[in-house]
Amino acid sequence: MEKLDIHIVGLGNLGSAFVNGLIDREDINLYLYDDSDVVRKSIQDKFLITPGNELSLIERGVLILCVKPQNINDFFNNNKDKLGTDILICSPVAGLEIKTIESYTDCKILRIMPNLLIKDNNGFIPYASNYDDDYLAFKVKVLEGLGVIKEFEEDMFPLITALSGSGPAWFYELSSQLVNSGQELGLSFDDAEMIIKELVKALPSLVDEDSSFKDLVSKVKSPNGTTEAGLNSLNKGSFDTIILDAIQKATQRSIEISRELSNE
């Protein structure tokens, strides 16, 4: 069976997560690119694969575009002549709409918004595309190996970006605040962080598909207990409003980035 060529451009956090999730696959050829000497050295040391510093001609396979939104215009202006029309461009770039990529190239385009959990093949990968078939069987052959995939209308991507793409940061920030509270109330920083890290590692085992998060909260709290006392304080402090505002702000920023990239 012919292997699928996958080219990953940009080896920061997300690009590295793709590499980590794909490095052991025997049905693909993996090609990596980054213009930073430091990043290339780090990737080479970690994965024993040598990235290039710039693209060569790509005539087949999939290009996973992991560059920063502000660098998109330069990327296509510098590389559009190196991109064959038969390749599939897979873009996880925040705010980069399919129509904007179409202004640079005639390639088939798959827009995705994964989170960093793809590094362990446990990600959630929403997608939209400008083609009907599963070109190169990429969605089934590759993306499903990185996590759960689901198709959405593209106008939902700003909100999905806020909820899922940025999602790990919301949990990390909450965890950081729990550590700070533990330290403020008497624990050492190391002990507080150890307690919360062990908690976070255990949480996935408590989540099941048949229970809502409200159900899970109810399983933890008891009437007039310690958990209920803390939850009451959160609710009095408008915790729900704070979370809603954060998601709205992140969603709006994604919309703003889309407008900036499309020069609207």
Image (cartoon, helix red, strand yellow):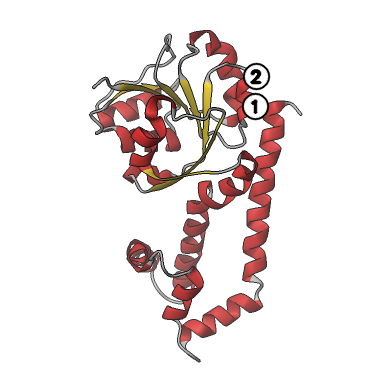
Task: Give the vertical position of 245 relative to 42 (above or below).
Answer: below
In the image, what residue type sits under mark 2?
Ser
Find residue 74 and report its image quarter.
top right
Which quadrant is home to the C terminus?
top right
In-image side of 111 versus 263 (left or right): left
In-image side of 200 versus 25 (left or right): right
Q: Spot the residue most to the front.
A: 133
At label 2, counting other C-alpha atoms closer than 10 Å, the crowd grade (few under 14, some 14-19, many 20 or more) is few
Cα distance between the residues tagged 1 and 2: 6 Å
Q: Where is mark 2, residue-wise? A: 103
Q: In the rendered structure, are the residues bearing label 1 and label 2 in contact, judged by CB atoms less than 8 Å apart? A: yes
Residue at 53% x, 26% y is 109
Element under disc 2: loop
User: x, y (%) of residue 105?
Assistant: 58, 16
Q: Where is mark 1, residue-wise? A: 99
From the viewer's side, name the closer residue of 183 and 16: 16
